[in-house]
Amino acid sequence: MLSLGLLIKTFFKPLKNEYREGLVGISMFMGIVIKSLLIIFDLVFIVFFIGFEIVLFIAWILFPFSIIWGLYGAVFS
Amino acid sequence: MVQFFPNTSKIFQVAAFKLFYSSLPIVAIRLIVGLILFLLFILAASSGSNKILSLSYSFLVTLLILEVFYRFKISREKPEKDLSRISSGDNIADFLTLEAAQTLLKVPDLTNTNQIFLKLIGDPSINFVLTRSDISTEDINKILAGPAEKIPIEALFSESIAYSKKESQEYIDQFDILLALFKLNKGLANLEFQKELKENDLLNIVFWARRVYSDTIPFWEKPADQLGPGIFDTLATGWTLETEKYTRDLTRELTKGGLRSALVGRESTIDRIQKTLSRSGRKNVVLIGEPGIGKTTIILGLASKSQTGNLVAPLNYKRFLQLDLTALLAEAQTGELERRLRDLITEVKHSGNVILFIPNIELISGSKESRELDITGFFLQTLRDPDVAIIGTSTRDNWRRYVETKSGFAELFDVAEIKPPTSNEAIRILEDAAASIEPKHHVVITYKAINQTVELSERYVIDRALPGKAIDLLEEAATSVALNKKYFVESLDIQALITEETKIPVGTPTGTESEKLLNLEQELHKRIIDQEEAIKAVSESIRRARTITRTTNRPIGVFLFLGPTGVGKTETAKALAATYFGSENRMIRFDMNEFQDINSVTRLIGSPPGSSEYEAGGQLTEAVRKDPFTLVLLDEIEKAHRKVLELFLNIFDEGRIADASGRQISFTNTLIVATSNAGAEYIREAVGINEDISALKTNLLEKLQREGIFSPEFLNRFDSIVVYKPLTLDQVQQVTQLLLMDLAARIKKQDISLVVTPKAVKWLSNKGYNPTYGARPLRRLIADSVEDALAKKLLSKEVVRGSTVTIDIDSTDNLVFT
């Protein structure tokens, strides 16, 4: 979804597959810069997303137990 | 032996719970409880009542968990086993889908097939099957009102399993039960017969319903590789700014809904193309097939599958760009075309995600249609490049003629031959195509209309292949139905369209046509005296052609009429054209003594490309192409050149011939009558000595072969060879009467009555009869001695409107008009 594999695979390739002489070098440089930023963004996003998913998963697992918590609250509050 | 124990089956237990949980009172209770709990929760939260808040929360969560469990687990319960693992001791209930189990649970008596049918028709997908089968509510009510038909449930399931396996289904669903009911319930079997449906038709309709009602998977349940391309993928692909000027982006059009993929089947072709396009070496493939066979549909199907991630990984999320030759060539000055091509090829090579589609690849390799434009040289290097993938299409003929001749270019492509689908496959493709035609024209297409479209297009539209020609015909019929403010496209609409376009009567003959066919002999005898054998032979072949489905493409009938001149050979053909084909003008007549030299063949089928007469086309092929439902009369066939006769051998045998431009011309709906005077003298002599007619015919044919007039293989191609006997004086009198009746009918239009005495008829017969020319001089005699005299009397006002003219013989043996 975030093209992480493709960004890494094409890290040293010119941006937009530039082939015109004179532009290849600059495109490679631009590619490295932009792809580096995007890879960092991807990694941050993935870490955040995985974290969010873990939280969501735990919440989902614990969700039925909240019934007991609710009942406990109803009886003892 | 099939066993059915629903009580021990998990799927039935789940179905029972689902039925209970989705029943109206329970749904109402669920809604009310949910609403109350939610309101309580809100009220408690706002009032700070912790006890109520905690309690309402607990119940609300319990309800939510139950609902989630019901929606995502119970409602999606699959049968425990699939039919590939069924064995004799198994409980058949374990193989039923949840929907089928639910339906059966609603039936009070499972041995009563009427009750099962009643519960099945509550399902929209079953209703779809019945509507498309042309089965109305009245038909259904009649079945349900009929006596209860009881059969053991095991028998019903045995049939259901058979249908399920036939269609390679994993489980038994409602459709399988419905199909079994159609087989086992007498009322339904009778209805199936009344609606002229066969088992295979029902299977096709069910196939259609299964596709229409197939579950769509929500995106969150799809595997990750089918969720679309990565959001930053475009960074790793090249610019295609120049390419986009000269190409059409099929992928974009598919995504935006401008195009729709209607690919059905063709798995082996798709696999073949995938293998070529995903290998490490050169990646070029050409699809070879006749126009309308579905080459572009395959490309669109590939593009669509690629866009949804359903191809092999290297081909997913590629852009399919179709080369637009018109744009490429537009205003291209010298050198400009080369520049455009170079840019296009370079961009495609560096794009990394483009698959270039070149339709009709012969257009870039010197075909006549592109004014011999040949740019294949530009592609030679590109085609060897493993970074470029190109798909081309062509017809077998064009590929052979224009591309294969450039062996360096042609051999860089893998060839995938596209075979036409069978009739059944074509029906299923059309069912899919109906999904896009129906909303466009706001009509509903019945199954019989689809079936008829395939059947009739296969028979009457011969210059294109299935399924394309059938799809076009169906769309045309839908347009016509929509214009006539109708809602259902039925088989009659398809028949009417074919009749309108080809002038060929199709469908079952009814009313006056049936009567005409039954009394064809009498109709023809109104114009032809005697010649029983000929009249019988042609009448029988016409009746056969209009009522019994033919398995060959041969003409309706091919006849050779042998006999002396003036005995009614040509008249029979004219009478037939007038009686059956509707008018004498529906006859194409060739005087074959005009085709005596070898070059005559080109006059019949057209001159080859390049010659000055090429545009005119062939006299025979053009006439039959314009009017395929016609009578072809080949007068004095024995005088034609041998090459011309050989040409007709093919027509008589195959019912089709290619004209000079390679176009197939069908003679399937023509009636071919060849006449010949050869052996006339022999016939006259044989009749003179009262030789038996069958012996006469045998001897005559032997004589004609011996003398090299006709070859045995030529004579063998005729359905019937009829010998016309010379007319007797008595028969000539009858012919005279017919001609005079025709004259009387003509002048009756001017309110003048004509009465001819028997003496006058006899006088005219004697004068007009000639043993050599038969009844031919008779027409001239009537024109000279009767019509001329009448004309003069009309001019001199001796005969006026309301007069009755009597023709008789006076004492000097001359005609008198009183």
Image: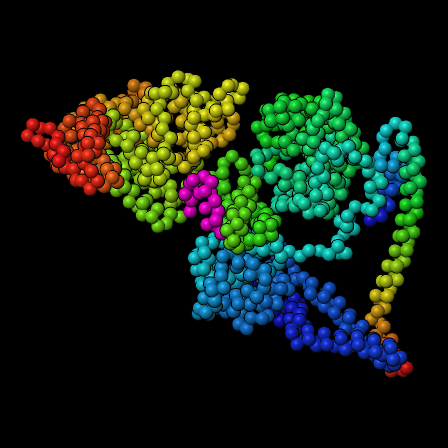
Q: Is residue B148 left or right of residue A72?
A: left
Residue lying at 22% horizontally and 24% vertically, measured from the top left: B773
Q: Position of residue B351 (x, y in %)?
A: 79, 35
Q: Residue at x 55, y 61 (%)?
A: B127
Kindly tell me whether residue B574 is visible in this rendering: yes
The colouring scheme, among rainbow, by chain, secondary structure or one colour, is rainbow
Q: x, y (%) of residue B742?
A: 24, 37
B593, above or below B522, in the image: above
Residue drawn at x 61%, y 66% is: B101
Magenta stretch prevailing secondary structure: helix
* Foreground of the two, B714 or B817: B817
Q: Residue at x 31, y 33 (%)?
A: B573
Q: Which quadrant of the figure has residue A28? A: top right
Q: Tell me the quarter of the image containing the C terminus of chain B.
A: top left
Farthest residue, direction front: B797
* Residue A71 visible somewhere in the drawing: no
Answer above or below: position of B387 versus B504: above
Q: Position of residue B315 (x, y in %)?
A: 74, 40
Within the image, what quadrant is residue B372 found in?
Answer: top right
Q: In this orientation, which residue lies closer to the viewer: B569 or B417?
A: B569
The residue segment tinted magenta is: B488-507
B349 lies above or below B116? above
- What is the x, y in percent for residue B780? 22, 27
Q: Is A59 contained in the magenta span?
A: no
Tell me if B50 is positioned left or right of B259 in this view: right
The mark tally for this picture is 0
Q: Determine the residue located farthest toward the left in the rendered image.
A: B811
Residue B501 in the magenta stretch? The answer is yes
